[in-house]
Amino acid sequence: MSHDTRLPDDPAPFPPFGVNKREQVYDSPWCGLRRDEVVLPNGDPQEYHVFEISNAVAVVPITREGEFVLVGQYRYTHGATQWEVPAGRLEDGEAPQTGALRELREETGYAPDRMVELPGFYPTGGISAHYAHAYCALDCDLVGELQLEASEQLIVRTFPRTQVEGLLDAGRFADGFTALSIAYALRIVPELA
Amino acid sequence: MSHDTRLPDDPAPFPPFGVNKREQVYDSPWCGLRRDEVVLPNGDPQEYHVFEISNAVAVVPITREGEFVLVGQYRYTHGATQWEVPAGRLEDGEAPQTGALRELREETGYAPDRMVELPGFYPTGGISAHYAHAYCALDCDLVGELQLEASEQLIVRTFPRTQVEGLLDAGRFADGFTALSIAYALRIVPELA
């Protein structure tokens, strides 16, 4: 790929909304919900809901033989079982790369030789400051058994790169973390170029 | 790109969790929060929070001249102003493509000749059934002024494709809807191949 290296700046920042009050309408160890009253640029007050949840990590694991390691995972929210990359929430104070290695180990039993950082992202920036860190784990080897939580139902399988690209382009990675992390890995990681 | 066309099946579906009760802990016209008690495969009950919000659309607009139309948008949740694709929530009963055309028109003033559907995705499938539909809008022309809500602060700018690819690979599209929709458009839309 050849890019125009004269990248434009980020847009000039707009002044932040004023905030009249912040009300915690729900809180729990898992997530919270805030209802703020913000002041719009025109001076009007407006309710703005902010969903609170710990930041997340997603990791695209590639074996020493060049295959992608995916998990077929059940999601309670929508009910489907889908191919995903290992992912999860960061624990309190946990460094993102440490969390990525932990989730990879727990959900697949694999550990890598090297980690390449991929761009992170706000999955739902309109409603939450929730941020996802993403990595590609290279030269992964199977080092042990899965260590699943009781709420996790998943199976592990390796896929050749051509099938992963086929699944991506066919829209079969309905999990956004998975689709974006894999798309980034395919674009950015030199070993995959 | 050449893909292995023998795509694997989706993973065999796991049986869904049982549900002992669903409790609506918060509700509003904008979003809701449910606290369910599910029954795990091992028979144990467990709290499971589900965040409720209407489904969304994102659209990658490309002008008749082949430039990408992006909006520099302020997000209250994290405070930054970033380049994004036009996106928003579907209105009640609104068809996804209609919503995509509406958001494109409101946030940029552009209208396309043709729409190509991109794969949709669950931005945060672990916590919400919230689903995003995505499109690429081709042969866009400027047809009028922006129609912004009072809470929207944004500017509109067109970018050559090379700069869009540069921004994507540099991780400068921190908005997940934006990064994934653009990555899909670059992979899938024949006019961009």
Image: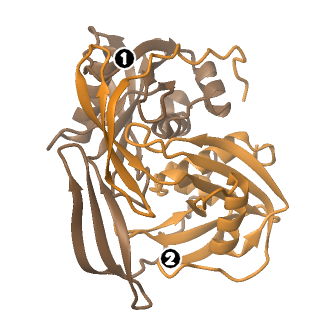
Chain colours: A orange, B brown
Residue A192, relative to residue B36: is it above or below?
above
Residue B74, relative to residue A104: is it above or below?
above
Is residue B134 visible in the rendered structure shown here?
Answer: yes
Residue at 35% over, 28% down? A19
Left or right, B94 with reference to A23: left
At label 1, counting other C-alpha atoms closer than 10 Å, the crowd grade (few under 14, some 14-19, many 20 or more) is many
Pointer 1 residue: B140
Indicate the chain on which mark 1 is placed: B
Q: Secondary structure at mark 2?
A: loop
Q: Position of residue A116 (x, y in %)?
A: 77, 48
Pointer 2 residue: A152
Residue B127, relative to residue B161: is it above or below?
below
Q: Secondary structure at mark 1?
A: strand
Indicate the chain on which mark 2 is placed: A
Is residue B112 visible in the rendered structure shown here?
Answer: no
At label 2, counting other C-alpha atoms closer than 10 Å, the crowd grade (few under 14, some 14-19, many 20 or more) is some
Q: Amino acid at mark 1?
A: Cys
The answer to which quarter of the image holds residue A28 is bottom left
From the viewer's side, name the closer residue of B189 and A171. Answer: A171
Q: Position of residue A151 (x, y in %)?
A: 47, 78
Name the quarter where the C terminus of chain A is drawn. Answer: top right
